[in-house]
Amino acid sequence: MDLSTFAESVGESGPVRIEGDCTRGGAPGDFPLVRAPAGIVEFLPAEMTLTCGAGTALAEVDSVLAAAGQMVSLGETGTVGGALGSGWSGVKRLGHGPVRDALLQCRYVNADGRVVKAGGPTVKNVSGFDLCRLMVGSRGTLGFLGEVILRTRPRPRCSKWFISSEADPVALLSALYRPASVLWNGTSVWVCLEGHPDDVAEQSQRIRGASEVAGPPPLPTGGRRSVAPRDLGALTGHFVAEMGVGVVHHADPASAVSVDPAVRLLHGRIKQCFDPVGRLNPGVDVLSPVGGKP
Amino acid sequence: MDAGLIDSLAAALDRDRVRTGPTELVLYGRDASNMHGSTAVVCLPTTAAEVQACVRISNDFGVPFVARGSGTGLAGGAVPLDGAVVISLAKMNRVLEVDVANRLAWVEPGVLNLDLTRAMEVHGLHFAPDPSSQQSCSIGGNVANNSGGPHCLADGVTNAHILGLEVVLPTGELVVLGGEDPEPAGLDLRGVFVGSEGMLGVATKVCVRLTQNPPGVRTLLMDFDSVEAGAETVSAIIASGVLPAALEMMDRLCIEAVEAFVHAGLPLDAAAVLLVEVSGLQRGLEADLERVVEIGRLHGARSVRIAKDEAERQLLWKGRKSAFGAIARIKPNYYLHDTVVPRRRLPEVLSKVYEIAARHELLVLNVFHAGDGNLHPLLVFDRREPGVVERVHAAGEEIVAVSVAVGGVLSGEHGIGLEKRDYMPLMFGPDDLAAQELLRSAFDPERRSNPHKVLPSPARCSDAHAVAEGMWI
């Protein structure tokens, strides 16, 4: 499916919703459903960019990038569009950065059914307002992502997870040089170290009582919370917290956060400007927490 | 100008922080670009409440306003138009709070970029964006322009280093966009504010992400017989999986000018030099360094000079960072361009840049962020020569067009401002520009915040949609 066919499927009027694999939830209601184009359009290893349909599976992207020793920081499951639409990062955000930094350019279908380009194909770009930032995490409420250019990064030569029940997770943030991930569940710490194998071995010595493990712990899926990193120490219950970042995977559902009325009003004006009749993903409120899997 | 406006501003701030002196008004009528506007009043607020008062009073009088940091912008972004009230954030220059363990700090927008990095040195941290103007440019200005710098190759430009913003919206409310927590509810309004060139409001407080200083750094210089060989080396390094901390290039004329200025021992007979910096943990660093040297030699590097100590490293960097000062030795005036092209197109774009300059009988020097494909052609000239300014502008326009034509972008780090506003259609179609207008309309329905910048032709939110409200319901 090309972009113009996708735009036609979105159409010019009537409510419409978009779905990928629904690994991060999905759009509610039984409105007409569309899917974004899938497939890799172009991968330029020397530019460190990959162009693909938003409906492309992250697993497919990862296997193509892996062959060239590269990767993209969008999490592991579901589709590219789902990862961008939700804005949820994977557990290595501490080292790899947030999802929003991976999107360089997008072509989305707007509420009038027209294809709009935002951003640019190069990593450095300050040419006008950066609407890509607006699209990441907008859950399909302002436009439906069709085709995107992603920023890739070198795949580390070596990536290892360690577990310790003795190490202090906050102290580790300073003791280690740019760890990819530091997770904490209130008793144990999981650390992901990446880079040259010798450096990984040397850094792991700094984690008291560390032993190598296959990967991160299973993440509780009751609710994904966003907490200032300095407040993570006060967490209670069954959780895995991303130290230095503030994403908390909790067994209990997240409660609604209070939103400044002026910020809510601004959100309303943005939605009104981009989708005046509210036809894109009706019923999705970006200011409400998402249920479902993290 | 309405005397009531100035009186109201003076009542909200101290009288001596509301300036109307003719000399000051001329100074604040321009920035570091060659464009100028005019203003009737300059406000120097010291608190967010005072900034809010400036915005609200401007709104009450129906007058636009423009926020200003250090005025080092090169695209005319801080130039006041339509008699805009200038709101200078220079007096709001305190580092408010630092969370060392989680590597973030709240700072006021007037804090200078290098001052922040220096203040964080004691914690082993720094603010990663390092524009050439870092001694004098402000964090607020960096936010407005999504500034870059040599070390943004590996660590990303300003947007990746801003976590939250306290902002006075153009409609007068004081709000926080983003914040210390990683996924605040709602849209990423922090993200769209960064790089919006003062058109979505005025930042009054910034939460910055701080970066660990690397445990090891190695800097090396390689030189080449041709610009093409240097540019191909750049692509090959990135393709090999090495992402250097910085990867900079200078061409022959620039090398000559810099060497005469800093005496760093640069090879005067080279067509191009590459300055490469790798950083990190010891073994990874050594492996990267070896790989870079190997790739350089494969592409015909004539010599490889690895800085043996910090003093030599500083000398090599001084050569790069003082390039713009060194150029005054050739001609009294220069026009600095800023475009980005895909790395693989660097050789052909550079040869076109030389061809364009030659055709317009101008000298061009290139010193740029090669790793990012971020070109900075410097056209040097003497303003007193008749017709030369017109030739400089004509050549500049062609350089921008060539960059966009090969799949590049209008600006990598200087922004659009006034300078490139009318070039926006080179990169964006009418629907794309209309979408950017929508964002502007949502933030600033009256278009009072830094008017007439970035977007070529105004359209209202309501103009952009043919569908009437509630049509399908």
Image (cartoon, helix red, strand yellow):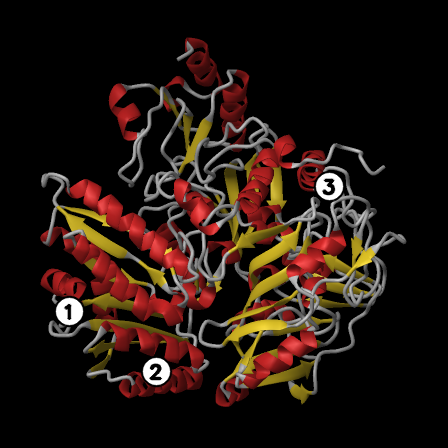
Amino acid type for the residue under numbered disc 1: Ala
Q: Chain of mark 3?
A: A
Describe the element under mark 1 as helix, strand or loop. Answer: loop
Name the quarter where the C terminus of chain A is drawn. bottom right
Q: What residue appears at the point 10 percent right and 39 percent down from the top-left corner? A: B384
Q: Which residue is mark 1?
A: B264
- Upstream in sequence: badge 2 or badge 1: 1
Is residue B109 rendered to the left or right of residue A39? left
- Tag 2 and tag 3, C-beta contact below 8 Å: no
Q: Position of residue A282 (x, y in %)?
A: 81, 47
Q: Quadrant of residue B218?
A: bottom left
Is residue A160 rendered to the left or right of residue B115? right
Is residue B348 or residue A125 the one in the foreground? B348
The CA span between labels 2 and 1 is 22 Å
Q: Quadrant of residue A28?
A: bottom right
The CA span between labels 2 and 3 is 50 Å
Q: What residue appears at the point 40 percent right and 40 percent down from the top-left corner? A: B422
Amino acid type for the residue under numbered disc 2: Val
- Whether residue B25 is situated above or below residue B387 in the rendered picture: above
Is residue A112 or residue A184 the one in the foreground? A112
In this view of the protein, can residue B319 be seen by the observer?
Answer: yes
User: Mark 2, residues whose alpha carbon is within 10 Å: few (<14), some, or many (≥20)?
Assistant: many
Q: Chain of mark 1?
A: B
User: Mark 1, residues whose alpha carbon is within 10 Å: few (<14), some, or many (≥20)?
Assistant: some
In this view of the protein, can residue A208 be seen by the observer?
Answer: no
